[in-house]
Amino acid sequence: MEATGVTAGGKPVTFPQYLLLNAKRFATRPAMRFKDYGIWQSWSWSEQRDEIRDFALGLKAMGLKEGERIAIVGSNRPRLYWAFCAAQSLKAIPVPVYADSVAEEMAFVLDNAGVRFAVVQDQEQVDKVQSVAADVPGLAEVIFDEPRGLRDYDPAHLHDFGAIQDKGRALADSDPKAVSDWEAGIRASDGSEISAILYTSGTTGRSKGVMLTASASVKAAEDTANFDHMSEHDEVLAYLPLAWVGDHYLNFAQGYVVGLCMSCPESPETVAQNLREIGPTFYFAPPRVFEGLLTSVMIRMEDASRVKKWLFHHYLAVAKAYGEKILEGRPVPLKGRISYWIGDKLIYGPLRNVLGFTRIRTAYTAGEAIGPDLFSFFRSLGINLKQLYGQTEAFLYVTAQKDGEVRPDTVGPAAPDVDIRIAENGEVHFRSPGMFAGYYGDAEKTRETMTEDGWVMTGDAGIFDAQGHLKIIDRAKDVGKMTTGALYAPKYIENKLKFFPNIKEAVAFGDGKDFVAVFLNIDLTAVGNWAERNNISYGSYQELAGMPRVYEMMTAHVNQVNRDLAAEPMMAGSQIQRFLVLHKELDADDGELTRTQKVRRSFIAERYAPLIEALYDGSSERFIDTEVTFEDGRKGSISATVKVADAETFPVVNAMPEAAE
């Protein structure tokens, strides 16, 4: 291995150092793919090095300096990923911003990070950046990837990505020393510089800029890539938000340290199709994506013939009985193996192919807890789905499940080289190789997050089981007790509800209350499909959500969750007594969800206080008027009289029959 990192015995300690190494050891292997105009284009590692070098030299000629922040805004595009590494090669700091951020959110991040340059995807992002220019006085230059629609824009301080590369390429051709100096600067790094600033999702308030050092980020990525035996032969599809730590870590960071191929979808709308075309070997998705996949499968089966429905449900039962055991190499009777083999030929294999999961060797889910039934469903199909627990402040991994030791009720033991402890108040603390260097420009928040002896406080409540696997109960501040003394863990209840394909989102209430009540969002695709099959006409989400037959459907789902909770002594006291179906979908643009689609619980409680009051005062309905934000940024309102329904509760099941036997 060629000497690179000056303090690491020749081992790369930055991602640009890995770029140079990969351009030599994997010169002709694919590094990046992108489907554009219906055609997959590929770049080898040596070609990707040249693309990044040219852009870096162009940025340097524009005046980008070491330590300066450069925003990156847009969907998953090769040029935006190249901008990350180009900035890092100059020791500048990339700051990715969620592409769907509203102007106010974007202005906060750009101003808070003090960016001077921004690399954006297209006209939409240029417009958004220019609309907040007055609130971001430091922003001087904007570089765009896609020129469509920008021909008549004022070219002052607005630059085409390709034109910047052309300048860099001309410099490289005319002055070979510029290239050698660029490479020498990369090799000279000891990895102590800030590699990126990733902003948190803002579940509990304003986003914070998490500073990650280069060497720590590289070490974390190396550890987990080795843990899952990843190599240059792996392929991934990069479809999750660029600004999210999951995408930056699992695709960019791990991709560089092992030299795998990263593919970018044609558009967010074609992800499912592109997934089937690429057939990745390593896959990551938050629970919400797996919920959506299950919903789409169930919807398609509703339209199948009677014979196909019977086969599907029969072999799903076989998979439930034997699938996970076979996946993990545990003993299974010969009859069970034969039945599962037939099911794989008829159902599981074709289903994996339709989902694009045929080649998957390892799949992960994280971001929030996944329902155990949903988790086991995918594993029973032969998909090696595992859970990890992580945070932006850890540069993702805190725990990870080992092959053969996967359970739905835990997130596994500590990841390689990570230390975990449970504080006296039940909060999870960790130390890790990728541990953040602090919050940008906010020393006070950094101190609040760190213990005096150098551990990071996660804000999550958890326990270890007898095997040393971590169980995350909920956000520490969200776990509480009801007036009856029963344990209240909202996320646990919500995940049980979201296993039903007809329920897209759930928000539970109960801390300090006499009973648990919930808000529900129906899944418009699933319930809309049901309505069409039953010749039920509707004009909007609001109209469909308020229909009596939809409430009957939701009542059946809530009652089933209560039956399940009754069988769990610790949770039996938190059965749901009342619920309502919200008149609108929870939306990140309205502040109800984070950009990573996590519920902002306190905001929702404040915004829908009249509805919460109706749940607990015995009302059968309540009128509410809610402000909404349209896609073009305009404000409006939605008003409705929301119905409140009662659910059936069940006596606690005596969970002792096995012991009695």
Image (cartoon, helix red, strand yellow):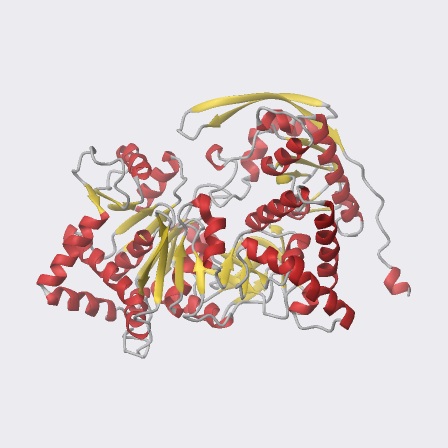
Quarter of the image with the C terminus is bottom right
Percent across and percent down for residue 15 are 33, 65
Q: Quadrant of residue 343?
A: bottom right
In the image, residue 213 sits, relative to residue 200, either above or below, namely below
Residue depicted at 74% across the width and 60% down the height: 318
Residue depicted at 25% across the width and 59% down the height: 52
Residue depicted at 63% across the width and 27% down the height: 544
Q: Quadrant of residue 521?
A: top right
Residue 427 in view, yes or no: no
Left or right side of 111 for 569: right
Q: Quadrant of residue 631?
A: top left
Left or right side of 474 for 102: left
Percent across and percent down for residue 245 are 44, 54
Percent across and percent down for residue 404 are 63, 71
Q: So how many labels did they put on this image?
A: 0
Residue in front for this viewpoint, 314 or 646: 314
Residue 354 in view, yes or no: yes
Quarter of the image with the N terminus is bottom left
Residue depicted at 50% across the width and 49% down the height: 272
Percent across and percent down for residue 125 are 32, 39
In the image, residue 115 sits, relative to residue 419, either above or below, namely above
Residue in front for this viewpoint, 232 or 87: 232
Left or right side of 332 for 197: left
Left or right side of 371 for 58: left
Residue that sits furthest to the right in the current view:
661
